[in-house]
Amino acid sequence: MTRYDYNMVMNNIRIADFKSRLSEHLRQVRRGHTLTVMDRNTPIARVVPYAEQGGILQVRSPHPKHPKLSRISLPPPLRLRRDVVSLLMEERQVER
């Protein structure tokens, strides 16, 4: 399935097809196409061409007006009457 968006073409691919024809799909990505890997009808991954420019992962220096991390004090410790691990286990049981 192919969808046409603003200025990009995205191909939706099932996992089995992605695994069986990986090299072919990677050649498409190398040509500039974006692939969306689907688990049934749920998108689980997007394969996009690699960009040499800084892109998402760009580390910046902190602003000169902000204090250094070594000068920021930590908050006071929490005073709980219960064990933190038991609270965590209780929270995880509720989600099931």
Image (cartoon, rainbow, N blue to C red):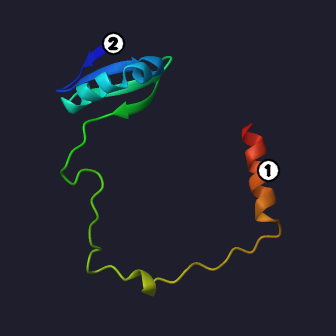
Secondary structure found at label 2: loop
> In the displayed structure, does residue 40 sit left or right of residue 76?
left
Question: Is 61 above or below relative to 92?
Answer: below
Q: Compute the Cα span from label 1 to label 2.
A: 44 Å
- The mark found on residue 90 in the picture is 1
The image quadrant that residue 87 belongs to is bottom right
Of the two numbered discs 1 and 2 on the same chain, state the one appearing first in sequence. Answer: 2
* Residue 43 at x, y percent in the picture: 44, 26
Q: Residue at x 21, y 54 (%)?
A: 54
User: Crowding near pointer 2: few (<14 within 10 Å), some, many (20+)?
Assistant: few
Instruction: Give the residue furthest to the bottom.
Output: 71
Q: Find out whether the residues at labels 1 and 2 contact each other: C-beta distance under 8 Å.
A: no
Instruction: Give the residue furthest to the top.
Output: 1
Residue that label 2 marks: 1
Which image quarter is the N terminus in?
top left
Which image quarter is the C terminus in?
top right
> In the displayed structure, does residue 73 sit left or right of residue 11?
right
Q: Residue at x 29, y 15 (%)?
A: 2
User: Crowding near pointer 1: few (<14 within 10 Å), some, many (20+)?
Assistant: few
Give, as a three-letter code, the residue at label 1: Glu
Secondary structure found at label 1: helix
Give, as a three-letter code, the residue at label 2: Met
Q: Residue at x 46, y 83 (%)?
A: 72
The nearer-to-camera label among 1 and 2 is 2
The image quadrant that residue 34 belongs to is top left
> In the displayed structure, does residue 72 sit left or right of residue 24?
right
* Residue 28 at x, y percent in the picture: 24, 25
Question: Is 87 above or below relative to 17?
Answer: below
Question: Is 46 above or below relative to 77?
Answer: above
The image quadrant that residue 30 belongs to is top left
* Residue 45 at x, y percent in the picture: 42, 32
> In the displayed structure, does residue 74 sit left or right of residue 3?
right
